[in-house]
Image (cartoon, grey):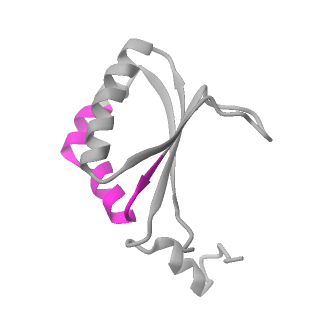
Amino acid sequence: MPSFKRDDRTFKHYEDTKMVVYFVVLLKITDADRFMECFQAVMLLIEQRGGRLIAQGIPKVIEVSNTGSMSAMFEYPSRQAFIDYWHSKEYAEIRKLREGAVDFQGVIVAGVAA
């Protein structure tokens, strides 16, 4: 099993910009109408930027408390593809739709080579 220590040479594997990354979000929807407007806009952009929705639904908490009422996972072909999407002018506009409609937490994690 790979180590996650920053001083370990295997950590570089997790920062490889060519490796598939997963963007995992936890959402607590506070305004359903505004959220749907945001969701429809962001899904178009995600697909244009090489991402794809691979999981979505109400999370079943196995351990710890649930902080979200909805979760989703997106796959991007590379870390750089995600970074380009996240910092794009198009996403900056869509992010404004999200404000006040949903409490949002998101993380990216590297895929593991088969």
Q: What's the magenta bit mostly, secondary-structure-wise?
A: helix
Total of numbered circles in the picture? 0
User: Which quadrant does the N terminus fall into?
Assistant: bottom right
Q: Is residue 112 above or below residue 86?
A: below
- Out of 47 and 106, give the one closest to the viewer: 47
52 inside magenta stretch: no
Please identify the quarter of the rendering in which residue 93 is found: top left
Outermost residue, left side: 89
Residue 112 in the image, given as x and y percentages of width and height? 57, 69
Outermost residue, bottom side: 9
Residue 44 in the image, given as x and y percentages of width and height? 27, 37
Please identify the quarter of the rendering in which residue 2 is found: bottom right
Residue 24 in the image, given as x and y percentages of width and height? 52, 46
Please identify the quarter of the rendering in which residue 37 is found: top left
Q: Is residue 88 above or below residue 30?
A: below
For the point 49% across and 33% down, the residue is 104
- Out of 59 and 95, give the one closest to the viewer: 59
Region rendered in magenta:
74-95
For the point 31% across and 27% down, the residue is 40
